[in-house]
Amino acid sequence: VGATQAGGRRWLREAPGLGNSSKVQPADNPTIFRAGVRRTLHALGAAGKQIVWVLNTPELGADVNACLRPAAGEGLLGPPAACSISSASHDARNAAYRDIMLSEIRQWNAERPLQAPAAKVLDPAGVLCEKGRCPLVLDGVPLYRDGDHLSIQGSDLLARWLVPQLPALAP
């Protein structure tokens, strides 16, 4: 644990804009995240790796058990509005994250060494959301095991979408 903590403090000290501060504030999180993304892109690129960044899956924050319980007058599942979020809500919640990710990837692509392949971005919201909603359950199949994490079935759906794209993403 000590080595991990010491390494973490060193990394924080090296994060742009944080100086030698050992007291990181929540307001520093975007700076720390941006520095981490930049370092990750540069490390992968320096190792000659093809970078394919899969953005976050929508986080529903829904009560899975309540959504999967039969509800009076609701058929087999709970009320649809409580068991999904709007695509707009997902976009708004992830706006800062997406801005950092996409701007760092654009910057990496613009400045990368000529021999390094361009980084690509995939957005799983395209497969997990439809008609302006990101549902907990799609076609009767629960996509999430809790409000934030995909179920086995949701992971399988995402993998069936992702795997066929990989050969086309190769340099």
Image (cartoon, rainbow, N blue to C red):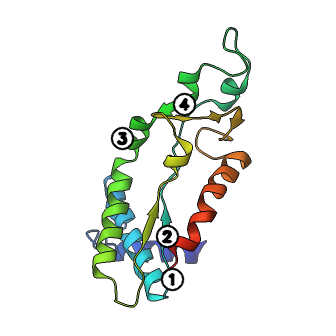
- The numbered mark, 3 or 4, whose residue comes first in the sequence reads 4
Picture coordinates of residue 55, whole percent (x, y): 48, 57
User: Marks 2 and 3: which is nearer the front?
Assistant: 2
Q: Amino acid at mark 1?
A: Lys
Quadrant assignment for the N terminus: bottom right
Pointer 4: what residue?
Answer: 84
Q: Are marks 3 and 4 in contact (CB under 8 Å)?
A: no
Q: Are marks 2 and 3 in contact (CB under 8 Å)?
A: no
Q: Are marks 1 and 4 in contact (CB under 8 Å)?
A: no
Inspect this view and state whether residue 21 appears.
Answer: no
Pointer 2: what residue?
Answer: 52
Picture coordinates of residue 153, whole percent (x, y): 72, 46
Q: CA distance from mark 2 to mark 1?
A: 9 Å
Q: Name the residue located 49 percent from the left edge and 77 percent from the top edge.
A: 7
**On screen, 139 above or below 3?**
above
Horizontal relation, residue 12 to residue 126: left or right: left
Q: Name the residue located 37 percent from the left edge and 62 percent from the top edge.
A: 101
- The numbered mark, 2 or 3, whose residue comes first in the sequence reads 2
Q: Amino acid at mark 3?
A: Ala
**On screen, 6 above or below 95?**
below
Horizontal relation, residue 80 to residue 104: left or right: right
The local crowd at label 1, few if under 14, some if 14 to 19, many if 20 or more residues have their Cα within 10 Å, is some
Pointer 3: what residue?
Answer: 92
Q: CA distance from mark 4 to mark 2?
A: 27 Å
Picture coordinates of residue 60, whole percent (x, y): 54, 37
